[in-house]
Amino acid sequence: MILMMNKKIIKNVNLAEKNCCLIRYQMPMLKYCFVFCTNYTGKNQYSEEELTTLFLTETKKLAKKYAQDENAFMFCFSGQSIRKRANFHVHVFIVKTRFEKAVVYSLLATKNWGQLIYKIIKK
């Protein structure tokens, strides 16, 4: 996605043990954005529930580190039927204010509307 700037893979032992990774990036007006993702597609040895619990635990640590508040985050994921990529992944946004929360929703809406319009035009 063009709005994802300054991507960087973050080393995390807890994630590596489950063959997962963490990518940090920035978006306009949002300094702390992350993607937790599995390094595999299809069936795997860990359920989505186990991975969600792991990702949520790690998200709280990130929020504590970057916002000094373990509950200052947005945790966004889509079910397998509607996600673009086959691997299980979760987008996390560390937000300190309601303004930043509004920015997240605005950027996500803009991105999804843009993809829809592109798909219509492409036909």
Image (tube, rainbow, N blue to C red):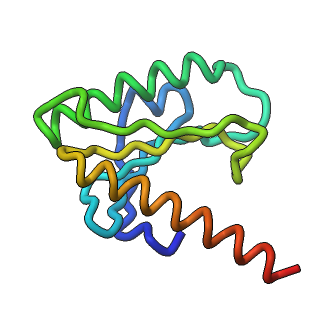
Relative height, residue 113 to residue 82 (above, below): below
| Coordinates of residue 45 in the picture (x, y in percent) | 69, 20
Q: Among all residues in the image, which is located at the extreme right?
A: 123
**In which quadrant will I find the C terminus?**
bottom right
| Coordinates of residue 111 in the picture (x, y in percent) | 55, 66
| Coordinates of residue 105 in the picture (x, y in percent) | 43, 53
Relative height, residue 26 to residue 24 (above, below): below
Image quarter for residue 99?
bottom left
| Coordinates of residue 107 in the picture (x, y in percent) | 44, 63
Q: Residue at x 54, y 24 (%)?
A: 51
Nearer to the camera, 24 or 112: 112
Q: Among all residues in the image, which is located at the extreme left?
A: 68
Could you tell whether 81 is left or right of 19 in the image?
right
Q: Residue at x 50, y 75 (%)?
A: 2
Relative height, residue 89 to residue 69 (above, below): below
Q: Residue at x 60, y 62 (%)?
A: 112
**In which quadrant will I find the N terminus?**
bottom right
